[in-house]
Structures are given as C-alpha cells and as structure tokens.
Amino acid sequence: MRILVVEDEKKVADFIKRGLEEEEFEVDIASDGEEGVSMGENVTYDLILMDIMLPKKDGLSAIREIRDKQITTPILCLTAKDTVDDIVAGLDVGSDDYLTKPFAFAELVARVKALIRRGSQDRGAELSFADLRLDPVAHRVWRSDKEIDLTSKEYALLEYFIRNANLVLTRNMIAEHVWDYTFDSFTNIIDVYVNYLRKKVDKNFDKKLIHTVRGVGYVLKESD
C-alpha cells in the first residue's frame, strides 16, 4: 500500500513516514500543496494524508483540486484546527476523515487502515483477464487451473498490469506505482521483474499475455 504525506514540517513528515513504514506502508512526502496535488494526480496512491496549513497551496484548496480532477483516493486531513466549522470545511471539499494535531500515532494508523479498507472494498473482488485470475485479498494468482507462486513485488507488478489490461504502461508509470516515487526508472530492474513475471505467467502457456512495446514499456493483452 502506498501513502502520500503532504506536510511542510519536516520533523512531523519524517516521523509519520518512519512510523507508517514500520507498519509496512510505502510512503512518499510532498512539502507543499502544489507538490501534493501534482503527486496525487500523477501517482496512484491508496491514501493521502493532507495537512491543512501548507505553503504555496493550502490543504483545503489542494483537496478541492484533487477532487476536481476526479481522483477518488481516500484523503485524511491532519491539522491543528479542531472546531466543528473546520472539520466540516475539510469534509465539504472532499476529505474522508479528519485528525487533529497533536495525535496519538496509534490512532493515526487505525484511521489510515480503516480508510484504506473502506476504499478497497470495491476492489476486493477477484480480478481476471483471459485465463489469468488474481485474488486481491489472499494475494493468490492462477493461470488456467494452475496456481502461480509470486513474490510480493511480482504480485504488485501483475496486479498493476491486470488492473490496466490492454493499456500500454511505461517504465515510469510502473516505477511510480510498484516502486517508490523517486525510483530511478532508467535502471533495468523493471525489465528484470517483467522477465521474472513472464517466466511464471507465460512460459508454459501457448498464449502469451505480457508483451513488450518497443521503446515505450509493456502491455497485458491477449495477442501481439
């Protein structure tokens, strides 16, 4: 699961990042509202933590802009303001929950997990493409009737492919979703993992599903 933390206080951002990473989340940080909107638009996150008092663009404006772009990622507001009017203002622009500073980190984690569960309820159904099936809850994969054993990164890569079947995915898109926002997409690690996946998903089957788009990236489709 990937989380974007939009927080201009470096100590607070680093504290949240370290804590969430200990809970096995992948965490990116944006230090102002404009950067938060840009990252929220260009990277697929499972949750956004948005501070309200931000430079360049305040948190409420950033949330409004994210929602105007039809981005439905769950958003949790973090702020020192705790009046009813402040809470209502945050919810009215499109946030899903509100946590006031200072907060107990255990409460933050609980709210994060609750929002991610709520946001992923409609994603829990089994995914399928051709004779490939994927169970997002159990993290299990089958090709025809054969179960395929994948590592966590291979699974994350395949899930991204199947959720975007028939769409050409650039190496940069894959890097941003499956790896970190700052991951160097010019290394060959993506190609290495795609080859790992091909050996497990395609090698022993006549119909190949993972295809290279020369000079661009990869696509999951039924034919060349």
Image (cartoon, grey):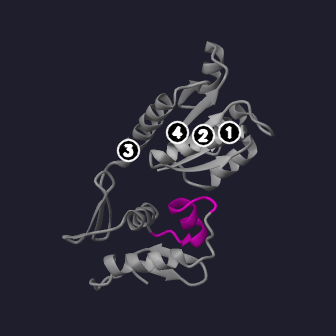
For this orientation, the residue located farthest to the right is 56
Q: Looking at the image, is 201 positioned above or below residue 81?
A: below
Q: Is residue 217 above or below residue 44?
A: below
**Would you call the spot at circle 1 few (<14 residues within 10 Å), some (14-19), or many (20 or more)?**
few
Is-magenta flag for residue 175? yes
* Secondary structure at numbered mark 4: loop
* Comparing labels 4 and 2, the label whose residue is closer to the camera: 2
In the picture of the structure, the residue carrying the numbered disc 3 is 122
Q: Nearer the viewer, residue 27 or 147?
A: 27
Residue 15: image tag = 2
Q: x, y (%) of residue 109?
A: 47, 35
Q: How busy is the neighbourhood of tag 3: few (under 14 within 10 Å), some, or many (20 plus)? A: few
Q: Secondary structure beneath disc 2?
A: helix
Residue stretch in magenta:
166-182
Determine which quarter of the picture holds residue 147: bottom left
Disc 4 residue crowd, few under 14, some 14–19, many 20+, Cα 10 Å: many
